[in-house]
Image (spheres, coloured by chain):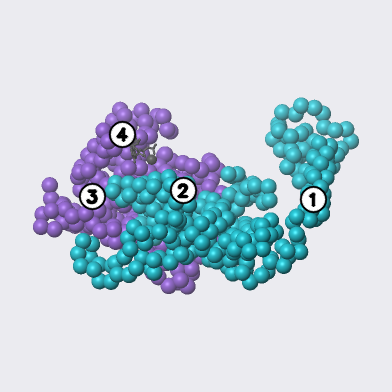
Chain colours: A purple, B cyan
Amino acid sequence: MTSEIPAEAENGTPMVLAESIRRSFGHNEVLRGIDLRVEPGEVLCLIGPSGSGKTTMLRCINHLEKIDSGRLWVDGDLVGYREHRGRLHELREREVCRRRADIGMVFQRFNLFAHMTALENIMEAPLRVRREKRSEVEKRARALLDRVGLGNRCEAYPSQLSGGQQQRVAIARALAMRPKLMLFDEPTSALDPELVGEVLDIMRGLAADGMTMVVVTHEMGFAREVADTVVFMDGGVVVESGPPGQVLVDPQHERTRSFLSKVL
Amino acid sequence: MALSADKAPGGEPGAQAPGSPAAPVTGAAGAGASTADVIKAVPVRHPGRWVGVAVLALLAAMLVHALVTNEAFHWDIVWKYLFSEQILRGLWATLFLTLYAMAIGVVGGVLLAILRLSPNPVLRSASWLYTWFFRGTPVMIQILFWASIGALYPRLSIGVPFGPEFASAESNTLIPLLGAAVLGLGLNEAAYMAEIVRAGVGAVDTGQAEASQALGMNQAQTMRRIVLPQAMRVIIPPTGNETISMLKTTSLVSVIAYTELLYAAQIIYSRNFQTIPLLMVAAIWYLAVTSVLSVGQYFLERHYDPAGRNRVGPSRPMRRDQSGVVT
Ligand SMILES: Nc1ncnc2c1ncn2[C@@H]1O[C@H](COP(=O)(O)OP(=O)(O)OP(=O)(O)O)[C@@H](O)[C@H]1O
Ligand SMILES: [Mg+2]
């Protein structure tokens, strides 16, 4: 297998391209040959039962997790490696960080920096990673907080915000790096039901603005409405993928049907 | 104490806010009192506490009486030496010993903790070995060891390992008494601080480092900007205790005849035989400095815990209202 981007992809580089990704933890093979393709501007929803490897797949995309075999490209760049004279070399930390900086990630548990205010959370990475000017970063951070409806909570610490507000700050924090791709790992699963809507609204807005998004979610309503593609994973493989109208409404596989009957 | 904190489990019927969802109401609301009124109740009496207070007050009075009337304390001599130049110089030396030793201890502790958390097994075991050795031997022996290293290696030199040397000097001039005292106390302290830092880093949710890395921050930035500042919440209180303990441990270096506070007092009473008053002088100064340090510790804790999540303990109010989580 070569690490060249396959020829069929040349009419427009896909934002994410995964080929036969495998990943084991000890004897537990969590990803067993995943193929995935996300076009720029596309919203892909990843669904599947617990333990099917959705989080692991997402973490591979920004190299928080290493892959054992297969090839993974983001925006045409091989993830985690550089090819030189037919051999793969691990990327240096600096290079890995540079690539991660272009990919936003939103976690199930928010993971806001607990010792910083909402504003500081958002400003940290643009200041430290991109070394941008403080005044500009602060202006942008305040605008982002406005955009997620929290313009009046700049000085609040995460512990003083509700779950939904924390997740909205977390989204703003990721957006402050002007990412070309956003990864969401069950962004609403840790929220009280009445707070789910405010986070999904922000994500809808992002999708409408043309952001490329990979969203692991159990919100089937959101998937049906916003996703361009729905991918159903089970046991470390992609069982079925296609437009939501097909996968969610008229699934072809028994496993997809039984999963959907449980969550819908 | 706020009355509202004494809410009975399950909520009293009279405390129900109007319009709140029906809760298991066990009795009729108090006749006449509207449920919307602020509760005015007779607080529970605690006669046992008052007995305790009386007993303690009596004991305190007896103690003061004994201290003041017993001639053997020689308060005039205590007063005479409390601000004497020799004692003040000793105090100054004690403060600097504490500062230097804690500086070595904190820096060394952070380095050792980072080594300990490294994926490399050699670095990990080196850190473990260090901690094992320095925690496993008495600090007194370590101080004596550094003070007499001249006997072991009369000359120390800088050069290529096993190769030519560029410069060398007498050990005893390179490591004077102060150096031996600081090394003995500091290297020992580093072993304890390493455990404290490691516990602090371990107490920070791994999601914090993950979020930091996902934003493109490198490992050093993640450690310095995200993990360590949060670990401080856990690290500061025991470090304050270590500093206070260090201040008193410095009195051990009197064994190598370094003139810190205790040794200064000893020098004086070996001449005038006023042992008790001079020990009182030293004790008063130790007590004064540890008191100041405790106040400093309180403010440091506040600084590293601005959201008040860790603020528990009798002297500080719990802030259940803001975080919703009491730790
Ligand atoms: N760091 C790790 N070490 C060992 N096993 C792991 C690790 N991370 C994940 N796993 C295992 O991999 C499997 C898949 O985990 P993953 O988190 O990717 O599933 P998921 O589809 O996201 O599930 P969920 O819906 O519960 O979040 C699980 O069995 C999990 O125990
Ligand atoms: Mg998951």
Subunit bearing disc 3: A
Q: Which mark is residue A234?
A: 4
Badge 3 and badge 4 both on one subunit: yes
Question: Which residue does the numbered mark 2 point to in the structure image?
Answer: B138
Q: Nearer the viewer, mark 4 or mark 1?
A: 1
Where disc 4 sits, the SS reads strand
In the image shown, does A225 or B235 lie closer to the viewer? B235
CB contact under 8 Å: marks 3 and 2 = no
Is B280 drawn above or below residue B24 in the view shown?
below
Q: Position of residue B48 (x, y in %)?
A: 81, 36
In the image shown, does B87 or A35 lie closer to the viewer? B87
CB contact under 8 Å: marks 3 and 4 = no
Where disc 1 sits, the SS reads helix
Q: Nearer the viewer, mark 3 or mark 4?
A: 3
Badge 1 and badge 3 both on one subunit: no
Compute the Cα span from label 4 to label 1: 80 Å
CB contact under 8 Å: marks 4 and 2 = no
* Mark 1 residue type: Ala
* Mark 4 residue type: Asp
Where disc 2 sits, the SS reads loop
Subunit bearing disc 2: B
Label 3 CB less than 8 angstroms from ligand 1: no
Left or right relative to B248: residue A72: left
**Residue A89 seen in render:** yes
Left or right relative to A250: residue B244: right
Left or right relative to B12: residue A136: left
Residue extending furthest left?
A85
Label 4 CB less than 8 angstroms from ligand 1: no
Is A240 drawn above or below residue B61 in the view shown?
above
